[in-house]
Image (cartoon, rainbow, N blue to C red):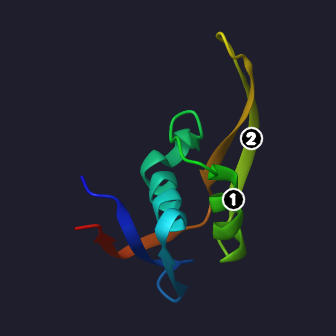
Amino acid sequence: MNAIVKLQIRVGGEDGRILILKGRVAWMVDRLIQSGERGTTSVESPAPRVSAYVFKARKAGLNIETVDESHDGAFSGRHARYFLRSQVEVLDVERAA
């Protein structure tokens, strides 16, 4: 499946405002929509700057919750799990050719 380059969503129900997200921010919001109640992490959705994309999505008006989690393994540590809490409806998706 080709990468998302533009995502148009309605936030907040039928009378909500419409956002047009582009690039990695569109990709991140799509990942959050697809992950639903299980949320997503940079471990599950690797990208150069997941936290920056979440920050930009929040600045656009989306409610995204962050939960701090620990992980085991050779490189044990902590990571953030992100949950989209805004009600959104996908209106249009543009993918790379």
The foreground one among 80 and 5 is: 5
**Residue that sits furthest to the top in the current view:** 74
The foreground one among 13 and 53 is: 53
The label nearer to you, 2 versus 1, is: 1
Precedes in sequence: disc 2 or disc 1: 1
Q: What SS does tag 2 mark? A: strand
Residue depicted at x 48% and y 74% = 22
Q: What SS does tag 1 mark? A: helix
Image coords of residue 67 (percent x, y): 74, 40
Q: CA distance from mark 2 to mark 1?
A: 16 Å
**Pointer 2 local density, CA inside 10 Å: few below 14, some 14–19, many at least 20:** few
Image coords of residue 91 (percent x, y): 36, 78
Q: Amino acid at mark 2?
A: Val
In the picture shown, does residue 42 fall above or below 12? Answer: above
- The residue singled out by tag 2 in the image is 67
The foreground one among 31 and 75 is: 75
Image coords of residue 59 (percent x, y): 72, 74
User: Which quadrant of the structure image shows residue 43?
Assistant: top right
In the drawing, what numbered circle is on residue 62? Answer: none
- The residue singled out by tag 1 in the image is 52
Q: 67 left or right of 7?
A: right
Residue depicted at x 32% and y 72% = 93
